[in-house]
Amino acid sequence: MKTAVRRLYRKLKQAVRGLDEKLDPRWVAAKVWGGRVSLSDNNAYPDFCYAAAHDSRLFSTFRTARVYRTILEHITDADAMVCLQELRKCPEVLALLNEFRRNDEVGGPRLLNAGEFGRISGTTLRYAKVAADLHQLFGSLDGQRIFEIGVGYGGQCRVIDACWRVQQYCLVDLRPVLDLAQAYLDRYALRTQIRYSTMNELSTEAPDLLISNYAFSELPRAVQDIYMEKVVLRSPRGYITFNDMNPAEYRSWTVRELCDAIPGARVLPEIPLTYEKNCLIVWG
């Protein structure tokens, strides 16, 4: 089993060999996946997640694997430091930074020097900044039921669990991605009840809060429609980081369409701005 997984990983590495890591990782991803930005219609990303979830050697350093960093773990140091500056505006969340740093004990991420705050990964700082946004927008999330569409390796979930006593956290993604997230989160003692669900496994139950860091906005409209019916329009509160870079043939929901469809939705700037026209869509 492990031999087969490692053989798959070697093939995945060959797919991105020779790419300049200084390029915008999302541009790289678009080139590698034949111009497709959404993760839902290619196999390389979920294949790697499956491999990392089932092989301890790959798992120990999955956050620095080049094939993985084309999709995640690619925030620039400059953007990470902007996240840190934003965190200073929310002392309640900033006070937990040492606890968030434990996120980096798993997966072997690249760390940056955050000055007085020591060494921490840029991705963890971004997840902390999202938590600060949630605190400022919605206050305490104690007792809430949260759904996250597009979960990475579960880092956002772990940061939120460190901040609040959430009743339940449902992670929604492709099954191999969920396998990796579970392998990651199982390394921690979490306070909340965790659920792992694919899109087709979702019921129409309403969460208290919906979160999606880019993933929902990067899907084709047909897939977005299912999420809209099952989760988005049933969520009284939401926080979506909107990535405006989908190909025209996806016919993805636009910012205006989402704001017209979701009661009380409004647009806020993405800070730091990671791509032209990106924004936040929040409601509740």
Image (cartoon, rainbow, N blue to C red):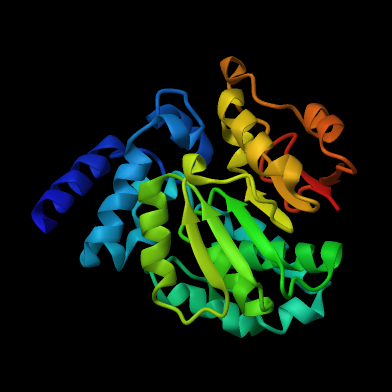
- In the displayed structure image, the side of residue 133 where residue 21 appears, left or right: left
Location of residue 90 in the rendering, given as x and y in whole percent from the top left corner: 81, 74
Depth order, front residue of 225/90? 225
- Up/down of 82 relative to 175, above or below: below
- In the displayed structure image, the side of residue 233 where residue 56 appears, left or right: left
Q: Quadrant of residue 279?
A: top right
Location of residue 39 in the rendering, given as x and y in whole percent from the top left corner: 46, 36
Residue at x 61%, y 24% (from the top left corner): 221
Location of residue 283 in the rendering, given as x and y in whole percent from the top left corner: 84, 49
Residue at x 76%, y 51% (from the top left corner): 238
Residue at x 76%, y 68% (from the top left corner): 132
Residue 273 visible in the displayed image = no
- Up/down of 122 relative to 9, above or below: below
Residue 21 visible in the displayed image = yes
- Up/down of 5 relative to 162, above or below: above
Q: Quarter holding the N terminus?
A: bottom left
Depth order, front residue of 178/28? 178
Residue at x 58%, y 83% (from the top left corner): 99
Location of residue 254 in the rendering, given as x and y in whole percent from the top left corner: 74, 27
- In the displayed structure image, the side of residue 138 where residue 17 appears, left or right: left
Give the total number of marks visible in the rendering: 0
Q: Quadrant of residue 180?
A: bottom left
Q: Quadrant of residue 220?
A: top right
